[in-house]
Image (tube, rainbow, N blue to C red):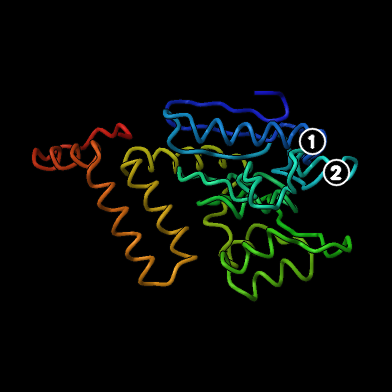
Amino acid sequence: MAGTVLYERDGHIATITYNRPEALNAINGELRRDLNAAWEQFRTDDEAWVGIVTGAGRAFCAGADLKDPGSSVGNDEHSFWEVPSLTSLESGKEIWKPVIAAVNGYAIGFGLTLVASCDLILASDRAQFGFPEVQLGVPTVQGAVRMPRLIGWQGAMELLLLGDRIDAERAKELGLVMRVVPHDELMDEARALAERLIDNCGPLAVRATKEIARRGMDLPLVDAIRFGETMRKVAGATEDAAAFREAAAKGERPVWRAR
């Protein structure tokens, strides 16, 4: 992986790190391409069961690099936000493996959009969050779509319409952040959470549950339940499901293999 984004896998945990600390990990064309490649590597890496995304230095991601405004959204033939270009997690790339955001500092603009795309969010007590777009005279797009679904209308409007930054404790109050931890303990906490997912939960069952939850938000209730029942039958026919049944009969812990 190129230098602006690091992809490192330790066992079944993959860590993706924004790596432009000198620019507060602001997204330019190079970082955008490298980040898209990292998400694709995570999606297709059979041994990567859980992802952690964080930033190098004192920022998670400070948003678009205003010195490179055209390239921060990517260089393919489609607009970054159009459905055909689902090359990034922010723009809707379907990755059903769980992703933990370890927010170590500023999560602004595109950075906060990425946070809102993750499943479990831990924040350093130094973290700050914000969508400053309206203060720059442009609308927030992905954030405006995601935030009301994620934290409700009032909290979303606080972030989206005022454009001010909020601290980690306020983000937790709004329901954006799962837990605020001391800065120096952030990555240890994120890894411990990832290990809980790996040790205690069948990886295919986790992915199926995430897919049911995400797709179910866009379906009528009855259709969502039917979709979930179909997914449950598929997951119930896996080797992992059989391994659980065998282990339970013996009073043992199952050995998950993601098969």
Q: Position of residue 86 (x, y in %)?
A: 62, 45
Q: Is residue 140 above or below residue 240?
A: below
Q: Position of residue 229 (x, y in %)?
A: 29, 59
Q: Position of residue 9 (x, y in %)?
A: 51, 26
Q: Which residue is mark 1?
A: 29
Residue at the extreme left of the image, as rendered: 249
The local secondary structure at tag 1 comes to helix
Q: Is residue 13 above or below residue 219?
A: above
Left/right of residue 53 with respect to residue 60 in the rendered view? left
Q: Which residue is mark 2?
A: 70
Could you say which is closer to the camera, residue 248 or residue 34?
34
Q: Position of residue 145 (x, y in %)?
A: 65, 64
Disc 2 to disc 1: CB gap under 8 Å: yes
Could you say which is closer to the camera, residue 81 or residue 164?
81
The local secondary structure at tag 2 comes to loop
Task: Name the residue located 30 percent from the left edge and 56 percent from the top edge.
Answer: 230
